[in-house]
Image (cartoon, rainbow, N blue to C red):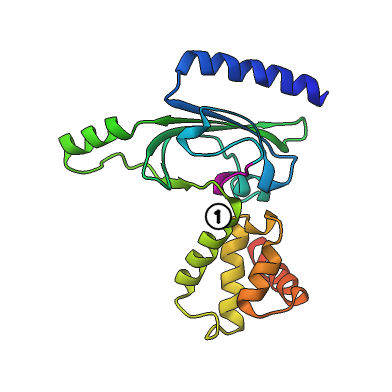
Amino acid sequence: MEREEFAWLNQIMDMMEAHFGRDVELVLHDLKKDYTQTIIDIRNGGITGRKIGDGGDNLGLGVIRGTEKNGNKFNYLNYTEDGKTLKSSTLFLRDKTGKPVYALAINEDVTQMWKFEQYLKEKNQSGREADHIVRDVNKLLEDSMEEAQRQIGKSYRAMDKMDKQAYIKFLDERGIFLISKSTQRVCEALQIAKCTLYNYLDLVRKEDED
């Protein structure tokens, strides 16, 4: 069945590649795989520098984690590490139980058009929320940890128990603990044992349920 699914998804990718041309990157993620290796098909991957076997982004993590209830986003802005501006759309394909199993993303390189529009308007008035596409999921982990620390406003050494729980809650809501070896990396940063991390996770998740 999985081969049949891939076959018709591959046909869709072929059609879109022929239609949109080389300035549009098409990415197919298999969300059943390890999140560091979800990309099973990609066209014009040079736009973001990604390839088959690379991982997903924050949006996918949120959908798998359940903090993004729908996840489908159309016509939003993304930025690559090398400064490109992309107009993106992402569609999550679900099984009969509602579990996300595939994600199809379209990333159009609109860098030059966007610069010209900014020049005409003198500022960006799109109002759309922007994200960043990264090539390496490990960098996504490190960037999220840095952002969590900025939110707390303290060095790791200065964080008390409540700070660490808030830090873990921030990462958990982003789905960061779905990334392989993320718990080990966070434990090292916070200087806590894995059992402590799991206890904190239980506490912050129960708070959300309440």
Magenta-highlighted residues = 54-59
Q: Position of residue 126 (x, y in %)?
A: 30, 39
Relative to the observer, which residue lies in front, 7 or 53? 53
Tell me if residue 200 is in the magenta stretch.
Answer: no
Q: Quadrant of the N terminus?
A: top right
Q: Quadrant of the C terminus?
A: bottom right
Tell me if residue 58 is in the magenta stretch.
Answer: yes
Placement of 141 over or under 48, stated as above or below: below
Mark 1 lies on a secondary structure that is helix
Tell me the residue at 48%/74% (across/down).
Answer: 152
Report the number of discs.
1
Tell me the residue at 52%/86% (across/down).
Answer: 158
Q: Amino acid at mark 1?
A: Leu
Q: Which residue is mark 1?
A: 140
Mark 1: few/some/many CA within 10 Å (<14, 14-19, 20+)? many
- The dominant secondary structure in magenta is loop
Q: Position of residue 156 (x, y in %)?
A: 54, 80
Tell me the residue at 67%/62% (across/down).
Answer: 182
Res. 75 visible in picture: no
Q: Quadrant of residue 207?
A: bottom right
Relative to the observer, which residue lies in front, 115 or 159? 115
Relative to the observer, which residue lies in front, 98 or 5? 5
